[in-house]
Image (cartoon, rainbow, N blue to C red):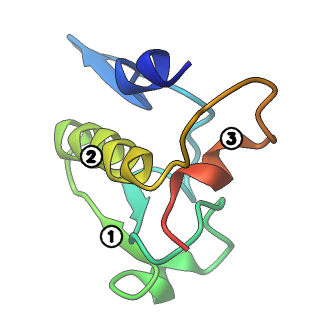
Amino acid sequence: MRAYLESSSLAALLGNTLFVHGAVDARSMGLVPVDTTRFEMPPPGSEAHVGTRFRRYETVAAWVVALNDFLRRGLVTLPLPLTLPLTLPLTLTLTQP
């Protein structure tokens, strides 16, 4: 399972098509939680938290790189051994406390 997660991506950009694990909307587009923020859907008014709870990326390409870097950093803190069943939502276990 760990090997699967290590070879996965939260987002991929192929040409002008974006593939994501989850959804993209006006609140989440371009935002990545800082490492000390638990992964969450950015709340209404989340622009006020850019710099403290989220980082904003202006281009889709930069956002995709940042999302995947966020995943990689979260995997470093994932406890071993990683076995099924995992407690869902999995994204909550991928971030630093």
Circle 3 residue = 90
Instruction: Determine the residue located farthest toward the front in the rendered image.
Output: 81
The mark found on residue 69 in the picture is 2
Quarter placement of the N terminus: top right
> How many angstroms separate mark 3 from mark 2 (CA)?
16 Å
Which residue lies at the image location 62% right of the left edge and 32% below the top edge?
A: 22
The mark that comes first in sequence, 3 or 2, is 2
> Looking at this view, is 81 or 58 the one in front?
81
**Is residue 89 rendered to the left or right of residue 56?**
right
Amino acid type of the residue tagged 3 in the rendering: Leu
Q: Residues within 10 Å of mark 2 (few under 14, many from 20)?
A: some
Circle 1 residue = 55
Which residue lies at the image location 49% right of the left edge and 25% below the top edge?
A: 2
Can you tell which of label 1 and label 3 is closer to the viewer? 3
Q: Is residue 46 above or below residue 52?
A: above
* Number of numbered labels in the structure image: 3
SS category of the residue bearing label 2: helix
**Is residue 20 rendered to the left or right of residue 44?**
left
| Cβ–Cβ under 8 Å for marks 3 and 2 | no
Please provide percent x and percent y for residue 60: 26, 39
> Looking at this view, is 93 or 60 the one in front?
93
